[in-house]
Image (cartoon, helix red, strand yellow):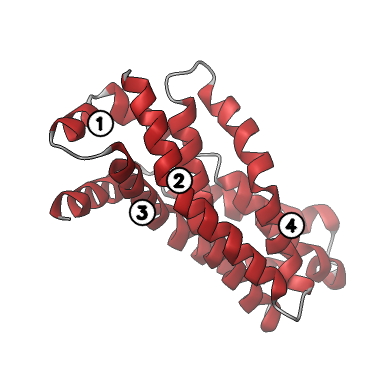
């Protein structure tokens, strides 16, 4: 557990120090800022479409750190050192999932809170938006880690990762954006189930991909 905690702490510290955490946040806020200029000052239109736009921006922001999640540590031999120390590939992938979520999830939620003001979202719609993103960010982080492991070492890995991630994230987008117009809360329950499933399978899928890279 001490080794796992040290890996997570190293990755989180490195992500914040290198600025990789802030690029998705800047992108997210930029997208939220541009949208009201594009559709005009119609408050009702912003209320009806703003939540969906913020969800799309969150999905696209997930693509930005893909090429920095796995490949740099592979090139530097860090994963080989961890394997020599007796850590399983699945445990390494799980640590990367946690560290990436810590560097990606909370800043994105803060950005969503700020961006919601530009869309005129407040009250229950704002609470629902933040709840849906809080539920989905672990799954988005898991998808990013899994796809980064699957595409590591390939030419054009960033573009290929985007082509893989977007279709897989569509169910989360449907239920996440749909939760804003679902007073029953069932969309959030489906979103939570999808998120839990993706978080559960990420260490095994990413671990298998990392193992295949060494063979």
* Residue 29 sits in quarter: bottom right
Q: Nearer the viewer, residue 185 or 18?
A: 185
Q: Position of residue 34 (x, y in %)?
A: 71, 52
Left or right of 131, for residue 100: left
- The residue singled out by tag 1 in the image is 79
Task: Give the spatial CA distance, label 2 vs label 3.
Answer: 11 Å
Left or right of 118, for residue 152: left
> From where the camera sits, is residue 7 visible?
yes
Q: Earlier in the sequence, mark 2 or mark 3?
A: 3
Q: How many residues crowd mark 3 within 10 Å: few (<14), some (14–19), many (20+)?
A: many
Task: Give the spatial CA distance, label 4 vs label 2.
Answer: 21 Å
Q: How many residues crowd mark 2 within 10 Å: few (<14), some (14–19), many (20+)?
A: many
Under tag 1, what secondary structure? Answer: helix
Left or right of 121, for residue 86: left
Under tag 3, what secondary structure? Answer: helix
Q: Earlier in the sequence, mark 2 or mark 1?
A: 1
Residue found 70% across the figure and 48% down from its top: 170
- The residue singled out by tag 2 in the image is 202
Left or right of 130, for residue 2: left
Under tag 4, what secondary structure? Answer: helix
Cβ atoms under marks 4 and 2 closer than 8 Å: no
Q: Position of residue 93 (x, y in %)?
A: 35, 42
Residue found 86% across the figure and 66% down from its top: 45
- The residue singled out by tag 4 in the image is 174
Q: How many residues crowd mark 4 within 10 Å: few (<14), some (14–19), many (20+)?
A: some
Q: Earlier in the sequence, mark 3 or mark 4?
A: 3
Q: Which mark is residue 98?
A: 3
Q: Position of residue 1 (x, y in %)?
A: 17, 55
**Up-down: is 75 above or below 88?**
above
Task: Give the spatial CA distance, label 2 vs label 1.
Answer: 17 Å
Closer to the observer: label 2 or label 1? 2
């Amino acid at each position: 557990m001490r080794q796992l905690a040290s890996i997570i702490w190293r990755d989180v510290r490195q992500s914040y120090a290198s600025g990789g955490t802030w690029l998705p946040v800047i992108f997210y806020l930029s997208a939220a800022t541009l949208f009201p200029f594009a559709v005009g000052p119609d408050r009702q239109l912003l209320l009806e479409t703003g939540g969906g736009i913020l969800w799309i921006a969150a999905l696209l922001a997930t693509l930005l750190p893909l090429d920095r999640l796995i490949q740099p540590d592979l090139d530097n031999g860090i994963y080989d050192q961890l394997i020599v120390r007796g850590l399983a590939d699945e445990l390494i992938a799980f640590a990367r999932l946690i560290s990436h979520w810590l560097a990606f999830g909370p800043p994105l939620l803060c950005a969503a809170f700020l961006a919601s003001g530009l869309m005129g979202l407040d009250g229950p719609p704002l609470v629902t938006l933040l709840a849906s993103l809080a539920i989905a960010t672990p799954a988005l982080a898991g998808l990013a880690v899994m796809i980064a492991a699957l595409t590591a070492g390939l030419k054009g890995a960033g573009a290929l990762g985007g082509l893989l991630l977007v279709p897989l994230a569509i169910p989360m987008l449907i239920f996440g954006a749909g939760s804003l117009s679902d007073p029953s809360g069932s969309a959030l329950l489906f979103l939570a189930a999808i998120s839990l499933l993706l978080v559960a399978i990420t260490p095994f899928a990413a671990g298998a991909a990392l193992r295949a890279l060494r063979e």
